[in-house]
Image (spheres, rainbow, N blue to C red):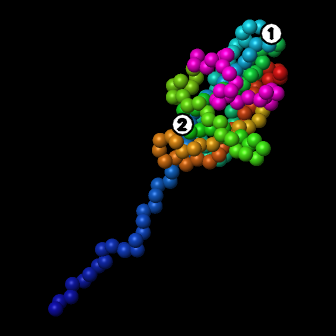
Amino acid sequence: MIGIPHKMVCNCQNNTPTPAPKQKLSAHFSFVAWFVPTNAPVAPKPFSEVVIKELTLDGTDKEVEIKLPEGCTGKMKLKAVYVRVDKKGISFEEDWGGNKHLQKIEYKPTAELDDTSTIDPYMSLSRPTLVMDIAGMAPQGEWRIVYDGTSSGDLESAPTKIKYRFTGDTSLLKD
């Protein structure tokens, strides 16, 4: 018998392919300050300019700056900040006496994030998409944002802090 050289065709170590890394969750957020009048039936400007930022929820701190209008001291005050996002399943996470509480952020398609006409300036403060503090809002602080996995796609995320800072006429923050 003549021997035929044999070369091993496959390396049978049963290595499974490395899965592709998950894509980090990135979303567009819109932030707008909502004002109420202090001594008039209607605030001169019910809303600040809308700030839209694309943020990745990857566990690293993010920053947003909300500009308050000038020349309105004594005419209106900040009542709340209205936040919307273009991905479903994103919430504020709050700690109430050791208990975690999630407050859903309103979903809006990206094209509608800067449209304040869909915000009712006379709405109840019990609406879940408002961030407020009855005693007045600090000139700076932070919100903790989490994702529950309900948007389409296999996305990776981590709780992320958004550090906010108001600029402009900060006297509008006082009650």
- Say which residue label 2 marks: 88
The x, y position of residue 11, in whole percent, is 36, 74
- Say which residue label 1 marks: 39
Relative side of 7 to 84, left or right: left
The x, y position of residue 40, in whole percent, is 77, 8
Q: Residue furthest top?
A: 41
The x, y position of residue 49, in whole percent, is 66, 20
Q: Residue furthest left?
A: 1
**Tag 2 or tag 1, which sits nearer the N-term?**
1
Task: Give, as a three-letter code, the residue at label 1.
Answer: Asn
Relative side of 108 to 125, left or right: left
Q: Residue furthest bottom?
A: 1
Residue in the foreground of this view, choosing between 13 and 119: 119
Residue shown at the point (77%, 29%) measured from the top left: 133
Compared with 2, 153 (above or below) is above
- Give the magenta-colored segment's residue range: 116-139
Q: Quadrant of the N terminus?
A: bottom left
Compared with 122, 133 (above or below) is below
